[in-house]
Image (spheres, grey):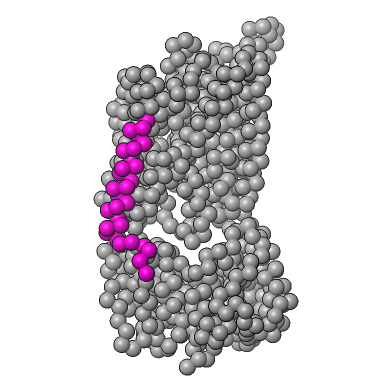
Amino acid sequence: MAPRQAGAPAGRTGEDAAEAPRRPAAFRPDIEGLRGVAVLAVLAFHAAVPAFTGGYVGVDVFFVISGFLITGLLLGRPIGLRDFAARRARRILPAAAVVLVATALAGGALLDPLRGTDLARDLIASAGQFANWRFVGRQTDYLAAERDPSPLQHFWSLGVENQFYLLWGILLLGLARHLAGRRRTAAIALATTVIGGVSLALCIRWTADSAPLGYFSTASRLWEFATGACAALLGTAIAGWLPRAGRAARPADRALRLLGWAGAAAVVLAVFRYDRNTPFPGSAALLPVLGTAAVLLAGPAHRALGPTDAGRLLATRPLRAAGRLSYAWYLWHWPVLTIAQARYGALPWTTLAALTAASALPAWLTLRLVEQPLRYGSSPAPRRGLAVGASALVIPLIAGLTLGGGTVRAVGKADLPVVVPAGAVDGPALLAPGTRVLTLTPSLARAREDFPPGKGCEIPLGAESSPRCLFGAETSPDRIVLVGDSHAGQWISAALELAGQRHWALEVLVKPGCPLATLTVRNNVLGRTFDECDRWRENTLTRLATGPRPRLILMAGLNRYGSQEERTEGWTRTLDRLSAVGAPLAYLADTPMPGKDIPTCLAASDGRSDACFFPRESAFERDPLTDGGLAGRYGVRVLDLGPLLCPGTGPDCPAVLEGVVLYRDTGHITDTLARVLAPRLDRGLLGAG
């Protein structure tokens, strides 16, 4: 599942409306306290504080509050789109710019060059207010999904919020320009309901199909803002009705108090009952979203805040203080946590909590020196606000470009061609006799992008069948079929050399995260059981059984799915069907698993080839084919390269061997290594030589 990040608490509790001299809105201390609850839940979740397993629902609380406040502001007074944009820019962008520039400086000084390259790209996306779409792409790109979280990943929510402000400002101000009175209110209510309904449907669908798209996409989050907008519209109607309600006013007041407590309980329940395994947002987000709307609707905008109101608890000084600081605190805490862990490794929750608390100091300075002076001291003229916003966009962009240029100079360009050294056919050496590599190959800049050809062959998670994906002599009646997950896909170049030498075709049937062994698995990106994997496997096995017989079926895959017993049973069921095809079967045992981003580790150690060793004990899992006797039972020819890539009997395995960088991420080999190993595959699988 996609990593949980909180929404940037960019809205302000009544202060936006308070800036309007024509119709000042009553200050809502309960909303300020509600924002305090939300940000504390988010911070506790990010610090891994026990029990706060669902603290990420703070994103929903902030989004609903923003929809409520902005709709109330736009309905409460006449305002032009230019003035509205200037207010938003002056309020949100300067503090964000300060954090972006500070993160760029800290990242350049403390992070390795490869992380610095990613940070520069994230900084540009964050400054441009489209960070959410960058992270949609990164999280749904299986080849990049194993990288560490970005110090700016939390800016996704700021991008969503600003995109909402743009859409909502155009929509509501456009309706206000052409309609008036009840017709305008009815049109806004209809538009809000339609947009919210469509967005909720997309959210539920995308959460089931692709958790990153459901989580980071603006379209899947609009319904949360729309829920806040509906609460604002309904609250206005209640405020107009209560003075005329007569005897019905007292029971209505009691009902609103109960509604407020029910809403607060719903938010708290989500914070402590949800966890990383909850399919989110989806329908699960209804609980905190509707709970927040209930608290907002029950508040004191249309009646006095009584001693038994939930809002009375929310309006206490500590929660209000956290609410005032929430935006800046949210912006500062995540870079502090991620940069610290990138520098020093995984930290215990107590240390993370202390770092989160410490980040309140720069947050307070940002509030006092940046947010408040620009909010209260700068000219209210739209031109001045837009100029401030433009500066707050341009300065971080310059910082991102500067950081990116520095990291490119440090690690080189990723698009330079790789000279592949000759590999040994057999024996304990990786390279052929007389072959030497003088510098790391591929380079560190290239290593992370050293993917196999035919990326399109690794079908999307939602796909249930592989396309026609042929390499080499495509018209040849003879072919090798490479089948499995992404750990099979990493061998495409080597398998292509085997096929090419014989003028055969290579057919690739690969689905990331899907074992060829017949067992049902959970996919963390989808956040659920990987049903598409089961259907893909069935379709693939049927395709092999009914199509032309291959010259060789080459199987490979990650040896980490399920338990040892489940893997054995799963492979038995699969091999029963594959052996009936009548083609020779071969199996490439899984390569060692480093469990950490090797190119990043090497960059942090200045490329020393003796750095970044990883434990042998965790690098291998018992394999049913090589260790359980299944290969012999089904006549499968096995090639296990583990002893070559992790030589000797010592406690550790290397990340670099004879100058060749072995891994492109936390578990996949570089395409360079696959090509170096091609002669060994030819000898071991087809008996060449």
- The answer to whether residue 306 of the structure is visible from this angle is no
Question: For the image shown, how many numbered marks are present on the structure?
Answer: 0
Relative image position of residue 107 (x, y in whole percent):
30, 49
- The answer to whether residue 484 of the structure is visible from this angle is yes
Depth check, front residue: 106 or 688:
688
The rendered magenta stretch, by its main secondary structure, is classed as helix
For residue 155, side relative to residue 561 (left or right): left
Residue at 31 percent of width and 28 percent of height: 370
Depth check, front residue: 603 or 632:
603
Query: Does 407 appear in magenta?
Result: yes
Residue at 56 percent of width and 84 percent of height: 503
For residue 54, side relative to residue 372 (left or right): right
Residue closest to the far bottom: 689
Query: Does 521 appear in magenta?
Result: no
Place residue 323 in its image quadrant: top left
Relative image position of residue 670 (x, y in whole percent):
42, 70
Residue closest to the far front: 475
Place residue 665 in its image quadrant: bottom left
| Image: 64 above or below 137 | above
Depth check, front residue: 28 or 352:
28
Residue at 52 percent of width and 91 percent of height: 687
Relative image position of residue 244 (x, y in whole percent):
67, 6
Relative image position of residue 233 (x, y in whole percent):
61, 21
Magenta residues, as a range?
A: 389-417
Residue at 30 percent of width and 78 percent of height: 437
Depth check, front residue: 132 or 364:
132
| Image: 472 above or below 90 | below
